[in-house]
Image (tube, grey):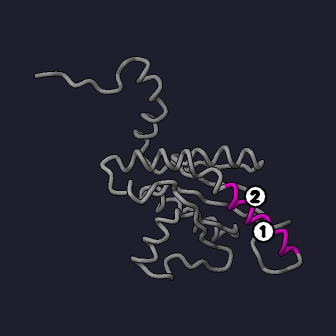
Amino acid sequence: MARPHAVVVPYPGSGNINPALQLAKLLHAHGIYITFVNTEHNHRRALAAEGAAAVRGRDGFRFETIPDGLLDADRDAADYDLGLSVATSHRCAAPLRDLVARLNGAAAGSAGGGGGAPPVTCMVLTALMSFALDVARGLGLPTMVLWGGSAASLMAHMRIRELRERGYIPLKVQAT
């Protein structure tokens, strides 16, 4: 049986990257081949801050990149977080699909013992990267979603529709 291969896709913010990286390291320690997907922007930032060692893989653990879909001019915008969320939701599916295809193509090419990565067998993503669920579903891959926030945050997130329907959000400003 081939070694399991998880593609880990965190939202490009430290509150998501760090927990996903810790989970990836734990999975790797238990024999799972890991491809950790950074955005190109965060990959460049890691290289600049910590050097090549920060993103150098090791046996069975590799780093890959996809674009985050955000224009460089929009990185300093006041609504950066909203812009990043919209950009990843709408522009990252195709690059992720292409990456998985490339990983699987390399695995097929190395079936004769070339030491490459095994075929992708599952995808682990953080909750804000829901487009990856569609990509995985289209490729027939099982998924796991990592929620890195608090339990209260999760409950609020799960009830947003109900809160909106009841008129609690968006919040209304009351004049004093």
Residues drawn in magenta: 97-111
**Quick one: 53 or 39, which is closer to the camera?**
39
Above or below 166: residue 122: below
Q: Is residue 107 magenta?
A: yes
Predominant SS of the magenta segment: helix
Residue 62 in which image quadrant: bottom right
Q: Residue at x 80, y 66 (%)?
A: 105
In the displayed image of the protein, which residue is found farthest to the top?
A: 166
Name which quarter of the figure residue 35 lies in: bottom right
Question: Residue 146, relative to residue 5: is it above or below?
Answer: above
Which residue is denoted by mark 1 in the rendering? 118
Amino acid type, callout 1: Pro
Question: Which residue is denoted by mark 2 in the rendering?
Answer: 121
Q: Residue 21: percent from the left, percent from the top? A: 53, 64
In the rendered image, residue 71, in percent from the top left (x then y), is placed at 45, 56
The quarter of the picture where residue 160 lies is top left
Residue occupying the far right of the picture: 112
Q: How many marks?
A: 2
Q: Residue 105: within the magenta?
A: yes
Q: Residues within 10 Å of mark 1 (few under 14, many from 20)?
A: many
Query: Observer-nearest residue: 135 or 153?
Result: 135
Residue 14 badge: none
Q: Secondary structure at mark 1?
A: loop
What amino acid is found at the position of numbered circle 2 in the picture? Thr
Question: Residue 108 location in percent, x, y?
Answer: 84, 68
| Proximity of marks 1 and 2: CB atoms separated by less than 8 Å | yes
Tell me the residue at 40%/44% (across/down): 82
Q: Residue furthest left?
A: 176
- Residue, x 46% and y 66% (percent of image)? 42
Q: Nearer the viewer, residue 137 or 91?
A: 91
Q: Residues within 10 Å of mark 2 (few under 14, many from 20)?
A: many
At a point 47% along the width and 56% down the height, the residue shown is 16
